[in-house]
Image (cartoon, rainbow, N blue to C red):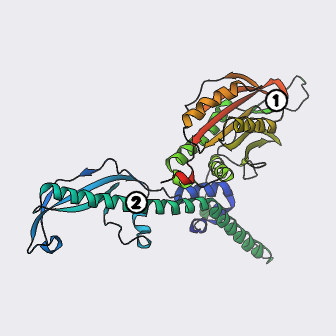
Amino acid sequence: MALAQQLTPREVQELSEEQFTTEALSERLIVPLAVDFDNPTRSEGQETVLPGESYGTRGPVPGSIIEISFKFAGSAWLFHSFASSQSSMLPCGEVREGELILTYTAPLHLAEERARQLLLDCLARDKDAIGVYIRSVNARVGEINAALPVAAKQAFRARKANLLQGQRIAASLDIPLKRRSPEDTRIVHVQPRRVALTHRLTSNSTSVPEWRLQEDEFAYILSVIDHMIAFMERSPQTFARMKEGELRDILLVALNGHYEGGGTGETFNFHGKTDILIRHEGKNVFIAECKFWNGAASFVQALDQLLGYTCWKDTRAALIVFNRQKNLTRVLTQIPELISTHPTFRRSLEAVSGTHLRFLLGHPTDRERIINLAILAFDVPDDLKIT
C-alpha cells in the first residue's frame, strides 16, 4: 500500500498499527454508487436536426435534444473505472456535480405519442443497463473495502520491519551516530486522547484502588461506535459480506484511532471470538460483545455470554447487535422485553436514541453490584439482498 511508503520514519515509529489502519481507511475506503432513479429532472427541449437514415427517411428530420439527470451518491470515478469490462451496450452519459446526465433525441416528424414512447423505452433500457453496471461495480467495491484493513496492516508491518532492519544494520557498524543540529530538530506536541478512569477504595483502606470508566468516557466510546455504525449503514454494499469478526475489527480500528494505546499500541483489543475490551492495570473496565440477531433465544444467549465474561469489578458493558433480518423496528421492540425479563434486570434508563438503549443490570455473581449496559442495534444487509 503506497500510503505506508509515504510515512516518514518517525511517523512509522510513533503511529500504532491501528492508527495507521484508521487513516488508511479514511483515505482509501471507496463509497459505493447509488443513483436516485426515482426522482429524475429534465432540461427544456433544444432544437436539432437528425439524420433521416436513422428513421427510414430521406434527408434530415427535425428533432429535439433532451437531457435527463439523476442525482447520485458515491465515488464519481466509479462510473468510468470499470466501464471497459462491462457490456458495450452501457449507455453514454456525463457525470457533472453529483448528477448522472443522459442525453436523448426525439424525432419530431413522428406522431408526438410515438416519439415520446421511443424516448421512454430507450430511457428504461439505459436505466436497466446502468443498474446492472452499478451492482457489478459495488460488488467489486465491497471486496476491495473488505480487504483494506488487512492490506493496510500488512503494508504498515512490512514498512516498520524494513525500517527496523535498516536501523539494526546501521547500528551494528560500530560507528557513532551523527547528531542533528538544533535547527533541524522540530518538536511537535501531540495530545492523544486517553481512556479517562476514576477509582474508589473499598471498605478496606489498604486495598488496591478499584478502577472505573467515567460515565462521559463511556458515552464517548459508545458515540464512536455509533458514528462508525452510521457510516456502515450509509454504505451497505461495503459491509454486506462481512462476518462478526470482520465487523468487530472495523469497530476496533475506529476506536483505536481515537485513543492512545497506553504503551501497548492497542487500547482496544479482543479476547475470544468477538470481545472488545479496555484493560487497565490488568483489569477490564469496559467490555463489549458483537452478535448477529438470530431471534430472541439467540439474543438472550449473547447477553448471558457477555455477562459471563464480566468479573466482579466490571461496571460498563455493551452488546452490539448486527441485524441482517427484516424489520429492525421489531427487533428494537423485542430487546427491552427480553432485557426486562432477564434475571439480572434492575431497571431501564433513558434511551440515547431509537437504536441505542441503556439498562442497569445486577452482576451475575453479586446482584448488589451494578452493570451499566448499552445495547446498540443496526442493520447490516444480507449479501443476497443487495440489488
- Residues at marks 1 and 2 touching, judged by CB atoms closer than 8 Å: no
x and y percent of residue 138 in the render? 49, 59
x and y percent of residue 222 in the render? 63, 38
Camera-side residue: 267 or 76? 76
Camera-side residue: 164 or 321? 321
Q: Quadrant of residue 79?
A: bottom left
Left or right? Give the position of 100 relative to 177: left
Query: Who comes first in sequence, dot 1 or dot 2?
Result: 2
Q: Residue at x 8, y 75 (%)?
A: 58
Left or right? Give the position of 96 relative to 58: right
> In the image, what residue type sits under mark 1?
Pro
Say how many tags the image has.
2
Camera-side residue: 69 or 184? 69
Alpha-carbon span between mark 1 and mark 2: 52 Å
Q: Quadrant of residue 354?
A: top right
> In the image, what residue type sits under mark 2?
Ala
Q: Secondary structure at mark 1?
A: loop
Q: Is residue 19 above or below residue 202?
A: below
Q: Is residue 93 above or below residue 221?
A: below
Left or right? Give the position of 164 relative to 155: right
Q: Residue at x 64, y 27 (%)?
A: 336
Camera-side residue: 205 or 324? 324
Q: Is residue 69 above or below residue 313?
A: below
Return the mark for residue 103. none
Return the mark for residue 76. 2
Q: Secondary structure at mark 2?
A: loop
Return the mark for residue 364. 1
Q: State whether residue 180 appears in this view.
A: no
